Image: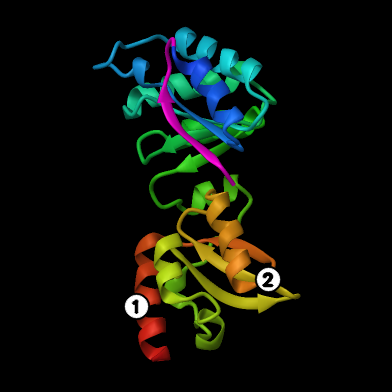
Amino acid sequence: MNFASPRPCGATTIPSGFLAVEAGADVIALKLRSCHPDQGDGSCEDAVRTVERVLAAVPVPLIVYGPGSADKDNEVLVAVAEKTKGEQLALGLCEDKNYRTIVAAALGNGHAVIAQTPIDVNLAKQLNIPYINLKYYNVNLEIVRRLPENQARRFRAVVLEERNGMLLVGMADPTDLNAADEIARIVKSGIDVAVVTEGQLLESIDRGYWRAQ
């Protein structure tokens, strides 16, 4: 998949989007940087207008990043989610301070979310993804090794078990669809994703791959 890097909102946004698509980009990422309090402090209305212009101009999926301030991300991304209902955007980044509001706005309006911090039990329920406490999980070493250790650390994921012809994979960020696709390619199997905390995940990787040696 070809991916165009995030760009700040502003006068160059639309030409940059066109050039990225012409160059073969499969996805466009838009950074609403000018809405940051220290970089213009643009309004929610400004952000919505920019996103709507990009949506109208490019025929590929759109990722929308907030300005990078937790409070302003909360305001801007909620407004964008509500005004672009049904457009199936990916909105981020969700952090501890704002993820509940952004996730609620995103899911309520047909969008996806991108998380920066580990997703907890409540968010797992909102995303309808199972949560697994690895502290009480018996890891199958043979199954674990289906995903090489370097890839497990790269994607923050661990293969947990095989069920009904699918591999169950615990991920610290199950909203990372590119990582999930790459894991499925590496393990040569369809996968089901579960939420795990990053701390427990790293401990399981250390313990599991050390015991496998």
Residue at figure coordinates x 43%, y 31% from the top left: 6
Find numbered disc 2 in the image and state the secondary structure of the residue it sits on.
loop
Say which element carries label 1: helix
* Disc 2: which residue: 189
The numbered mark at residue 17 is none
Identify whether 179 is placed above or below 209.
Answer: above
Q: Is residue 19 magenta?
A: no
- Give percent across and percent down for residue 150: 40, 71
Give above or below for 66 relative to 141.
Answer: above
Residue 203 x/y as whole percent? 35, 73
- Relative placement, left or right, of 56 versus 175 is right
What amino acid type should be assigned to the residue bearing mark 1? Answer: Asp
Q: Which residue is mark 1?
A: 206
Q: Is residue 134 above or below residue 85?
A: below
Region rendered in magenta: 1-11
Looking at the image, which residue is at 39% across and 67% down?
153
